[in-house]
Image (cartoon, rainbow, N blue to C red):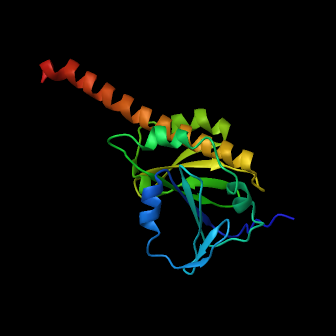
Amino acid sequence: MINRQSSQNITIEIYFNPYAFHESITKYQIENDGDWIKTKNGYMMREFGNYAILIYPILSQDNDIVMSLSEKLDNLDRFRESLMKPGNFKDSITLHVTENEITTSLDLDLQEIVGLSLVNDVISQKGVLFKENEDLTYVSVSIKRPLTSNSLSEYFSKIAYALKLYYKIREEQEDIALKTSLQFVNFL
């Protein structure tokens, strides 16, 4: 039977740059060195060549999240396309997993977007929503448990595409604001 630990909020950090990952873990004391390295301060981590995963709190090996992340994920380049660009460069992403959703962390610093409810009307049919908290926006994807490697990969893809959509909307809104301002500048 798969242990889900459903009442717990699990945090997953995905590092797209192994050097940044190594830099972030230098202060941790390693307790257990196996497939998943565990630390004395409650983290577990694993490297997969071009990315690394950090999870907290420590979960059992039969937890659906641990089992799903134990296989290499091939679609993480979609995150890189959105997050590793000049202007919004991030070499990692923090995700929070609950019983029924995965959300991005507010540390992405996604500003509010105009027309959020209209966007949500369109994308909600795919189980994706943009939500707001403390004047910031984050992505929420509805999930079904237990997770598998395939389902988690699909949910991560949805988050990556939602981030791409977010940045495209911000870019388009700025373009429209500039074009409209240029049209009206002669009237001022």
Q: Nearer the viewer, residue 6 or 86?
A: 86
Tell whether 129 sits left or right of 93: right
From the top left corner, tell me how far across and down residue 107 is, in percent: 43, 57
Residue closest to the far right: 1
Image: 110 above or below 176: below
From the top left corner, tell me how far across and down residue 177 is, in percent: 29, 28
Give the quarter of the figure containing the C terminus: top left
Give the quarter of the figure containing the N terminus: bottom right
Q: Nearer the viewer, residue 73 or 117?
A: 73
Image: 73 above or below 40: above
Residue lying at 27% horizontally and 22% vertically, measured from the top left: 179
Residue lying at 44% horizontally and 75% vertically, measured from the top left: 27
From the top left corner, tell me how far across and down residue 86 is, in percent: 33, 40
Q: Nearer the viewer, residue 75 or 96?
A: 75
Image: 18 above or below 116: below
Q: State the image quarter where residue 125 is shown.
A: top right
Residue lying at 61% horizontally and 41% vertically, measured from the top left: 75
From the top left corner, tell me how far across and down residue 181 is, in percent: 22, 25
Residue lying at 22% horizontally and 18% vertically, measured from the top left: 183
Callout count:
0
